[in-house]
Amino acid sequence: MTESYDEVMQLLCDRLNAIVNSNTLVTADTNLITQLSIDSIKLLNLIMEIEDAFDISIPINALADVQTVRQLADLVHKIKTSS
């Protein structure tokens, strides 16, 4: 089953809320680094969770330009729909 973009976005927001444990509301425009303080370890853990949840493989170099939740959702959705 191919998840819709909205399902991808919802899963990312839910996982990010669980990871950051703060009062920050995670939205599509939330910056992963400046607003959520996602460091490299948290990012790698998040990527592993995403890969498991969607049965995909995300190339690390594809994350170079990802700064917001929307950009990450776009990347995941693109990889998911092309596989």
Image (cartoon, grey):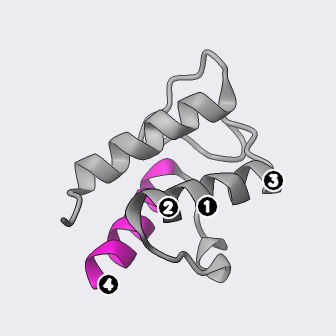
Which region of the structure is painted magenta? 69-83
Disc 3 to disc 1: CB gap under 8 Å? no
Give how far apart the Cα atoms at labels 2 and 1 are: 6 Å
Give how far apart the Cα atoms at labels 4 and 1 are: 17 Å
Disc 3 to disc 2: CB gap under 8 Å? no
Looking at the rendering, which quadrant does residue 83 occupy? bottom left
Disc 2 to disc 1: CB gap under 8 Å? yes
Query: Which amino acid, mark 3?
Result: Ile
Give how far apart the Cα atoms at labels 3 and 2 are: 17 Å
Q: Which mark is residue 48?
A: 1
Q: Position of residue 82 (x, y in %)?
A: 29, 84
Tell me the element at label 3. helix
Q: Position of residue 19 (x, y in %)?
A: 65, 34
Disc 3 to disc 4: CB gap under 8 Å? no
Residue 38 included in the magenta stretch of the image? no
Q: Position of residue 30 (x, y in %)?
A: 53, 40
Q: Is residue 68 left or right of residue 22?
A: left
Question: Local crowd at mark 2 within 10 Å, few (<14), some, or many (≥20)?
Answer: few
Give how far apart the Cα atoms at labels 2 and 4 are: 14 Å
What residue is shown with label 3? 41
What residue is shown with label 2? 52
